Image (cartoon, grey):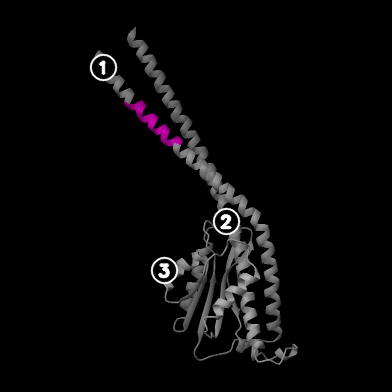
Amino acid sequence: MFSRLSNSAARSATLQSRNYATLRDIETRLKSIKNIEKITNTMKIVASTRLGKADRAKTTARVYIANDREVYSHAETAPVEAEQKSNLLIVMSSDKGLCGSIHSQIAKAARLRTAELQGQTVDIVAIGDKVKAQLNRTHSSNLVLAFNGIGKETPTFSDAALISDEILKLGKEYTNVEVFYNKFATSVSFEPTKASVYDAKSIEESPALSQYELDQDAKVPETLAEYSLANAIYAGLADGYAAEISARRNAMDNASKNAGDMISKYSILYNRTRQAVITNELVDIITGASSLD
Protein backbone atom coordinates (compact mmCIF):
# COMPACT_ATOMS: atom_id res chain seq x y z
CA MET A 1 0.00 0.00 0.00
CA PHE A 2 2.76 2.40 1.05
CA SER A 3 4.63 1.46 -2.14
CA ARG A 4 1.68 2.42 -4.30
CA LEU A 5 1.27 5.69 -2.42
CA SER A 6 4.96 6.53 -2.78
CA ASN A 7 4.89 5.77 -6.53
CA SER A 8 1.79 7.90 -6.97
CA ALA A 9 3.39 10.73 -5.02
CA ALA A 10 6.56 10.50 -7.12
CA ARG A 11 4.60 10.66 -10.38
CA SER A 12 2.58 13.57 -9.07
CA ALA A 13 5.74 15.41 -8.00
CA THR A 14 7.33 14.88 -11.44
CA LEU A 15 4.20 16.14 -13.22
CA GLN A 16 3.98 19.09 -10.86
CA SER A 17 7.63 20.00 -11.50
CA ARG A 18 7.10 19.77 -15.26
CA ASN A 19 4.03 22.02 -15.10
CA TYR A 20 5.89 24.61 -13.04
CA ALA A 21 8.77 24.61 -15.53
CA THR A 22 6.34 25.03 -18.45
CA LEU A 23 4.57 27.83 -16.60
CA ARG A 24 7.86 29.68 -16.05
CA ASP A 25 8.79 29.28 -19.73
CA ILE A 26 5.44 30.65 -20.87
CA GLU A 27 5.68 33.55 -18.41
CA THR A 28 9.20 34.43 -19.63
CA ARG A 29 8.15 34.29 -23.27
CA LEU A 30 5.03 36.34 -22.60
CA LYS A 31 7.12 39.02 -20.91
CA SER A 32 9.53 39.11 -23.88
CA ILE A 33 6.69 39.49 -26.39
CA LYS A 34 5.15 42.32 -24.34
CA ASN A 35 8.52 44.12 -24.33
CA ILE A 36 8.79 43.68 -28.11
CA GLU A 37 5.27 45.07 -28.53
CA LYS A 38 6.25 48.17 -26.54
CA ILE A 39 9.29 48.71 -28.77
CA THR A 40 7.38 48.25 -32.05
CA ASN A 41 4.59 50.54 -30.86
CA THR A 42 7.13 53.22 -29.96
CA MET A 43 8.85 52.89 -33.35
CA LYS A 44 5.47 53.13 -35.08
CA ILE A 45 4.67 56.36 -33.21
CA VAL A 46 8.10 57.83 -34.05
CA ALA A 47 7.67 56.93 -37.74
CA SER A 48 4.17 58.44 -37.81
CA THR A 49 5.54 61.66 -36.31
CA ARG A 50 8.34 61.88 -38.89
CA LEU A 51 6.12 61.07 -41.85
CA GLY A 52 4.56 64.54 -42.00
CA LYS A 53 7.95 66.24 -42.27
CA ALA A 54 9.15 63.63 -44.78
CA ASP A 55 6.05 64.21 -46.92
CA ARG A 56 6.67 67.96 -47.02
CA ALA A 57 10.30 67.41 -48.06
CA LYS A 58 9.17 65.00 -50.78
CA THR A 59 6.65 67.53 -52.14
CA THR A 60 9.30 70.28 -52.24
CA ALA A 61 11.83 68.03 -53.97
CA ARG A 62 9.28 66.96 -56.58
CA VAL A 63 8.75 70.64 -57.48
CA TYR A 64 12.52 71.03 -57.95
CA ILE A 65 12.85 68.04 -60.24
CA ALA A 66 9.63 68.81 -62.15
CA ASN A 67 10.93 72.30 -63.05
CA ASP A 68 14.30 70.81 -63.98
CA ARG A 69 12.71 68.29 -66.34
CA GLU A 70 10.41 70.93 -67.83
CA VAL A 71 13.42 73.04 -68.86
CA TYR A 72 15.10 70.14 -70.67
CA SER A 73 11.82 69.06 -72.23
CA HIS A 74 11.38 72.53 -73.76
CA ALA A 75 15.04 72.56 -74.79
CA GLU A 76 14.48 69.17 -76.52
CA THR A 77 17.47 67.72 -74.69
CA ALA A 78 18.32 64.12 -75.54
CA PRO A 79 21.19 61.77 -74.62
CA VAL A 80 24.14 61.96 -76.98
CA GLU A 81 24.87 58.69 -78.77
CA ALA A 82 28.36 57.39 -78.12
CA GLU A 83 30.27 54.40 -79.43
CA GLN A 84 31.84 53.64 -76.06
CA LYS A 85 29.11 53.93 -73.46
CA SER A 86 30.02 54.48 -69.84
CA ASN A 87 27.24 54.26 -67.27
CA LEU A 88 26.90 55.53 -63.73
CA LEU A 89 24.14 54.09 -61.53
CA ILE A 90 23.42 56.06 -58.36
CA VAL A 91 21.47 53.73 -56.06
CA MET A 92 19.77 55.17 -52.98
CA SER A 93 18.50 53.63 -49.77
CA SER A 94 19.56 54.38 -46.17
CA ASP A 95 21.45 53.02 -43.16
CA LYS A 96 18.38 51.84 -41.24
CA GLY A 97 16.37 48.63 -41.44
CA LEU A 98 13.05 47.37 -40.03
CA CYS A 99 11.14 48.77 -43.01
CA GLY A 100 10.14 45.71 -45.04
CA SER A 101 11.63 45.00 -48.46
CA ILE A 102 12.36 48.61 -49.38
CA HIS A 103 16.16 48.15 -49.50
CA SER A 104 16.17 44.78 -51.25
CA GLN A 105 13.76 46.02 -53.95
CA ILE A 106 15.96 48.95 -54.98
CA ALA A 107 19.07 46.73 -54.92
CA LYS A 108 17.26 44.24 -57.15
CA ALA A 109 16.36 47.01 -59.63
CA ALA A 110 20.02 48.08 -59.78
CA ARG A 111 21.21 44.50 -60.33
CA LEU A 112 18.73 43.99 -63.18
CA ARG A 113 19.83 47.24 -64.83
CA THR A 114 23.49 46.24 -64.51
CA ALA A 115 22.67 42.95 -66.24
CA GLU A 116 20.95 44.87 -69.07
CA LEU A 117 24.11 46.95 -69.57
CA GLN A 118 26.36 43.92 -69.80
CA GLY A 119 29.34 44.58 -72.05
CA GLN A 120 29.39 48.29 -71.20
CA THR A 121 31.28 50.10 -68.46
CA VAL A 122 29.04 50.29 -65.37
CA ASP A 123 30.03 52.12 -62.19
CA ILE A 124 27.81 52.15 -59.12
CA VAL A 125 27.52 54.74 -56.36
CA ALA A 126 25.74 53.35 -53.29
CA ILE A 127 23.98 55.84 -51.02
CA GLY A 128 23.15 54.14 -47.73
CA ASP A 129 24.72 51.21 -45.88
CA LYS A 130 21.83 48.83 -46.59
CA VAL A 131 22.04 48.97 -50.38
CA LYS A 132 25.83 49.07 -50.22
CA ALA A 133 25.88 45.78 -48.27
CA GLN A 134 23.55 44.09 -50.77
CA LEU A 135 25.36 45.30 -53.90
CA ASN A 136 28.76 44.59 -52.39
CA ARG A 137 27.90 40.89 -52.29
CA THR A 138 27.20 40.69 -56.03
CA HIS A 139 28.75 43.76 -57.71
CA SER A 140 31.71 44.76 -55.55
CA SER A 141 33.85 45.37 -58.65
CA ASN A 142 31.34 47.97 -59.90
CA LEU A 143 31.19 49.98 -56.67
CA VAL A 144 33.26 53.15 -56.98
CA LEU A 145 31.83 55.25 -54.16
CA ALA A 146 29.58 54.79 -51.12
CA PHE A 147 27.91 57.13 -48.63
CA ASN A 148 26.47 56.48 -45.19
CA GLY A 149 24.73 58.56 -42.54
CA ILE A 150 21.65 58.52 -44.79
CA GLY A 151 18.10 58.41 -43.40
CA LYS A 152 18.84 59.82 -39.94
CA GLU A 153 17.24 63.17 -40.72
CA THR A 154 15.01 64.61 -43.43
CA PRO A 155 17.16 65.11 -46.57
CA THR A 156 17.98 68.63 -47.75
CA PHE A 157 19.29 70.05 -51.02
CA SER A 158 22.59 70.73 -49.24
CA ASP A 159 22.95 67.00 -48.54
CA ALA A 160 22.32 66.24 -52.21
CA ALA A 161 24.81 68.92 -53.33
CA LEU A 162 27.54 67.45 -51.10
CA ILE A 163 26.94 63.97 -52.53
CA SER A 164 26.92 65.39 -56.06
CA ASP A 165 30.26 67.15 -55.45
CA GLU A 166 31.87 63.92 -54.24
CA ILE A 167 30.63 62.07 -57.34
CA LEU A 168 32.02 64.80 -59.61
CA LYS A 169 35.38 64.50 -57.83
CA LEU A 170 35.70 61.02 -59.32
CA GLY A 171 36.76 62.89 -62.45
CA LYS A 172 35.07 60.47 -64.84
CA GLU A 173 32.87 61.39 -67.79
CA TYR A 174 29.77 59.23 -68.15
CA THR A 175 27.56 59.10 -71.23
CA ASN A 176 24.65 57.82 -69.14
CA VAL A 177 23.79 58.66 -65.52
CA GLU A 178 20.80 57.03 -63.83
CA VAL A 179 19.44 57.56 -60.33
CA PHE A 180 17.63 54.66 -58.63
CA TYR A 181 15.36 55.40 -55.68
CA ASN A 182 12.14 54.25 -54.01
CA LYS A 183 9.29 56.49 -55.10
CA PHE A 184 6.55 57.11 -52.54
CA ALA A 185 3.30 55.91 -54.14
CA THR A 186 0.74 55.62 -51.33
CA SER A 187 0.89 55.25 -47.56
CA VAL A 188 1.15 51.48 -48.02
CA SER A 189 3.19 51.16 -51.21
CA PHE A 190 6.34 52.35 -52.95
CA GLU A 191 7.83 51.88 -56.41
CA PRO A 192 11.52 51.37 -57.30
CA THR A 193 12.14 54.12 -59.86
CA LYS A 194 14.87 55.07 -62.33
CA ALA A 195 15.55 58.67 -63.40
CA SER A 196 18.06 59.75 -66.05
CA VAL A 197 20.36 62.76 -65.69
CA TYR A 198 21.69 64.64 -68.74
CA ASP A 199 25.40 65.29 -69.03
CA ALA A 200 26.96 68.61 -70.10
CA LYS A 201 27.37 67.53 -73.74
CA SER A 202 23.69 66.56 -74.07
CA ILE A 203 22.64 69.91 -72.62
CA GLU A 204 25.05 71.84 -74.86
CA GLU A 205 23.67 70.15 -77.99
CA SER A 206 20.01 70.72 -77.08
CA PRO A 207 18.26 72.01 -80.26
CA ALA A 208 16.02 74.52 -78.47
CA LEU A 209 18.33 75.63 -75.66
CA SER A 210 18.78 79.00 -77.36
CA GLN A 211 15.23 80.01 -76.34
CA TYR A 212 16.61 80.58 -72.85
CA GLU A 213 18.71 83.66 -72.19
CA LEU A 214 21.94 82.11 -70.95
CA ASP A 215 25.34 83.66 -70.41
CA GLN A 216 27.70 83.08 -73.30
CA ASP A 217 29.99 81.02 -71.15
CA ALA A 218 31.41 77.64 -72.11
CA LYS A 219 30.89 76.43 -68.55
CA VAL A 220 27.12 77.00 -68.52
CA PRO A 221 26.20 73.48 -69.78
CA GLU A 222 28.57 71.97 -67.23
CA THR A 223 27.03 74.04 -64.43
CA LEU A 224 23.52 73.06 -65.52
CA ALA A 225 24.52 69.39 -65.59
CA GLU A 226 25.94 69.62 -62.05
CA TYR A 227 22.78 71.33 -60.82
CA SER A 228 20.60 68.70 -62.51
CA LEU A 229 22.57 65.92 -60.85
CA ALA A 230 22.11 67.53 -57.42
CA ASN A 231 18.40 68.02 -58.16
CA ALA A 232 17.95 64.37 -59.15
CA ILE A 233 19.79 63.17 -56.04
CA TYR A 234 17.72 65.48 -53.82
CA ALA A 235 14.46 64.24 -55.35
CA GLY A 236 15.56 60.63 -54.93
CA LEU A 237 16.65 61.13 -51.32
CA ALA A 238 13.44 62.94 -50.34
CA ASP A 239 11.10 60.49 -52.09
CA GLY A 240 13.05 57.52 -50.76
CA TYR A 241 13.01 58.91 -47.21
CA ALA A 242 9.22 59.35 -47.29
CA ALA A 243 8.78 55.85 -48.72
CA GLU A 244 11.08 54.39 -46.05
CA ILE A 245 9.37 56.14 -43.13
CA SER A 246 5.97 55.01 -44.41
CA ALA A 247 7.21 51.44 -44.90
CA ARG A 248 8.71 51.41 -41.38
CA ARG A 249 5.46 52.64 -39.87
CA ASN A 250 3.54 49.88 -41.68
CA ALA A 251 6.12 47.24 -40.70
CA MET A 252 5.98 48.28 -37.04
CA ASP A 253 2.18 48.38 -37.15
CA ASN A 254 2.09 44.81 -38.48
CA ALA A 255 4.69 43.72 -35.93
CA SER A 256 2.64 45.25 -33.10
CA LYS A 257 -0.51 43.49 -34.31
CA ASN A 258 1.33 40.16 -34.56
CA ALA A 259 2.77 40.67 -31.07
CA GLY A 260 -0.74 41.42 -29.78
CA ASP A 261 -2.04 38.18 -31.30
CA MET A 262 0.83 36.21 -29.74
CA ILE A 263 0.21 37.83 -26.35
CA SER A 264 -3.45 36.74 -26.50
CA LYS A 265 -2.50 33.15 -27.40
CA TYR A 266 0.22 32.88 -24.75
CA SER A 267 -2.04 34.47 -22.12
CA ILE A 268 -4.65 31.77 -22.76
CA LEU A 269 -1.95 29.08 -22.67
CA TYR A 270 -0.53 30.53 -19.46
CA ASN A 271 -3.94 30.58 -17.76
CA ARG A 272 -4.69 27.01 -18.83
CA THR A 273 -1.30 25.76 -17.62
CA ARG A 274 -1.70 27.64 -14.33
CA GLN A 275 -5.15 26.13 -13.93
CA ALA A 276 -3.68 22.67 -14.52
CA VAL A 277 -1.02 23.30 -11.84
CA ILE A 278 -3.66 24.39 -9.32
CA THR A 279 -5.85 21.39 -10.19
CA ASN A 280 -2.92 19.01 -9.68
CA GLU A 281 -2.15 20.62 -6.33
CA LEU A 282 -5.76 20.16 -5.23
CA VAL A 283 -5.68 16.53 -6.36
CA ASP A 284 -2.51 15.99 -4.32
CA ILE A 285 -4.10 17.54 -1.24
CA ILE A 286 -7.29 15.48 -1.59
CA THR A 287 -5.31 12.30 -2.27
CA GLY A 288 -3.10 12.92 0.77
CA ALA A 289 -6.11 13.61 2.98
CA SER A 290 -7.86 10.46 1.73
CA SER A 291 -4.80 8.30 2.42
CA LEU A 292 -4.74 9.49 6.04
CA ASP A 293 -8.32 8.33 6.49
Q: Mark 3 — residue?
A: 137
Q: Residues within 10 Å of mark 1 (few under 14, many from 20)?
A: few
Question: Is residue 224 at all visible to an observer of this figure?
Answer: yes
How far, Cα to Cα, is label 1 from label 2? Answer: 62 Å
Question: Is residue 235 at all visible to an observer of this figure?
Answer: no
Q: The C terminus is located in which quarter?
A: top left
CB contact under 8 Å: marks 3 and 1: no
In the visual, does 208 lie left or right of 198?
Answer: right
Q: Amino acid at mark 3?
A: Arg
Task: Name above or below for residue 220 compared with residue 292.
Answer: below
In the visual, does 67 lie left or right of 172?
Answer: right
Q: Residue at x 66, y 66 (%)?
A: 58
- Secondary structure state at the residue bearing disc 2: helix
Q: Mark 1 — residue?
A: 4
> Does the magenta-highlighted stretch encompass residue 202?
no
Q: Position of residue 108 (x, y in %)?
A: 49, 69
Q: Amino acid at mark 1?
A: Arg
